[in-house]
Amino acid sequence: MRETDFISGFAKGLSVIEAFDAANPRLSITDISRITGLERATARRCLLTLAQLGYADYDGKFFSLSPRILRLGHSYLTATPLPRLLQPFLDQLSEKTGESASASVLDGNEIVYIARASHKRVMSINLNPGSRLPAYCSSMGRVLLAAMNEGDAKSILENSNRKANTPNTKTTIADLMAELQLIREQGYAVIDQELEIGLCSIAIPVRNMRGTTIAALNVGAQAPRVTVDEMVATYLPVMQSTRDTLAGLLV
Amino acid sequence: MRETDFISGFAKGLSVIEAFDAANPRLSITDISRITGLERATARRCLLTLAQLGYADYDGKFFSLSPRILRLGHSYLTATPLPRLLQPFLDQLSEKTGESASASVLDGNEIVYIARASHKRVMSINLNPGSRLPAYCSSMGRVLLAAMNEGDAKSILENSNRKANTPNTKTTIADLMAELQLIREQGYAVIDQELEIGLCSIAIPVRNMRGTTIAALNVGAQAPRVTVDEMVATYLPVMQSTRDTLAGLLV
DNA sequence: GATTTTTGTTCGTATATCGCACAAAGCGTG
DNA sequence: CACGCTTTGTGCGATATACGAACAAAAATC
């Protein structure tokens, strides 16, 4: 690929979209310039382009994203077979277990939810397709890391901001690498309130016919109601049978 | 705004992302060129840019979107107060009614789901934040159209592909405009299997403190189980009380 | 209300991108 | 395996975009 095969204006525009988040829902030209590192003139041009295309609103002072932006993510969700394939199985799984069931893939050091059947909300945050969680402290993240070769997994862990969300959170590389080894041996990952107090979850890998792990599947539960052992005893078999039904459909 | 305030490379790149959908999950350079109308050289540069940034995967022949694309839509969902504000109320509403509850806004002639608490799946399609439905034949769409001035609503209806999804679907401009008038008078919209056989739903507008309609709220139900009258009698009061609780929080 | 600071806009220029035309590489088919 | 036929990659001139600085406008501070 040559130098000229990269459209920097496009890349800059995308970085402008990503500059918006919960902490910065409404941004001025200068704000965007500060966050993205773009020149003010360039940031302005990106924002005006977004506004003109209907992806952003502009009140003369602040820009904010418009719902049209959702078309972009939706392109992925409908265009990718995996989320659509998994959804009915998650619905089933959620029905059988009485808890929320989700599927995710890895993107950098985060997991990205690609499908979800939520039952009752046990977490303080709301999760949807597109939601992200750090890989190092989520059950699905650990399953996906365990499926990689050790070197890559280690470098992802090293590049993660491994903060202790709760007293239970494993944060050292050594502990986490040992945990990954355990997950490889037992074939599932369990998180006991490492992400949030009161939240337990169990995850297993989903593999295609060549044996490559292409996603993770999980079921979440409330800590006081269910112990880790109960979770393994009750949910794991249902999850595994869901995965087996699913297996034939995966390329 | 001047001519030079528009970055065409950015706009072209966005149209490339939107070219992917359920029918076209994997696209070659030529495919993209055909769908978007861009020059092949340009389409190629856009795709290579997406691939280099990690938003797309390339196997040497076909491009497909990667989960990183979800960051873009997620920017909107977390950056916009409304979806996050509505979510807990939808959870509540879904809990109380035992059915799915959703919120949406208008984008062109479609409604876009911005939050949802799904209970049991009554529809054949799966809905998530970002999902789109035609406004003319959905309860929330009708509520949002009814809130606009008649001329604008009419022109949206005229520009919609008003196909009859079921024998119940209202498709003529006259019928739909009359329906909007009724909705304005009674303050809610009811759909009786116009989108899909077996699916009924009821929607109400959500207004900010200035009285502007900023979203619609709905509850869906299964036709054989619940009649339209029962829906109005049972769900409408709960929905209205949810909206009232919510009202104080809206700017 | 004057001064300072911050923010938004404009402009000329260097440069990167566009689109065209051509070259190369697959891909079936006879 | 040579032949069209389709798809993909590349070089180049024309053109549009990004940069940086300078200017204008608006807040903020005093």
Image: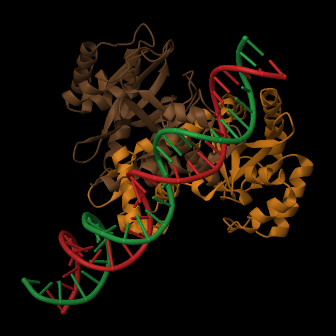
Chain colours: A brown, B orange, C red, D green
Please tell me in which quadrant of the rendered image residue A203 appears: top left
On the question of residue A135 being in view, the answer is yes
Q: Looking at the picture, does residue A171 appear above or below residue A119?
A: above
Residue at image location 78% in from the left, 50% down from the top? B144
Could you tell me residue D4's position as x and y percent?
25, 89
Q: How many numbered marks are there? A: 0
Q: Is residue B157 left or right of residue A227?
A: right
Residue at image location 85% in from the left, 59% down from the top? B179
Could you tell me residue B183's position as x and y percent?
86, 52
Could you tell me residue B176's position as x and y percent?
82, 63
Question: Quick one: quadrant of the N terminus of chain A?
Answer: bottom left
| Outermost right residue | B185
Could you tell me residue B221's position as x and y percent?
69, 46
Residue at image location 57% in from the left, 56% down from the top? B4
Along the line of sight, which residue is nearer the eye, A232 or B158? B158
Along the line of sight, which residue is nearer the eye, A223 or B222? A223
Q: Is residue A118 left or right of residue C24?
A: right
Q: Looking at the picture, does residue A70 appear above or below residue B242?
A: below
Residue at image location 40% in from the left, 21% down from the top? A231
Q: Is residue C16 left or right of residue B166?
A: left
On the question of residue B224 being in view, the answer is no
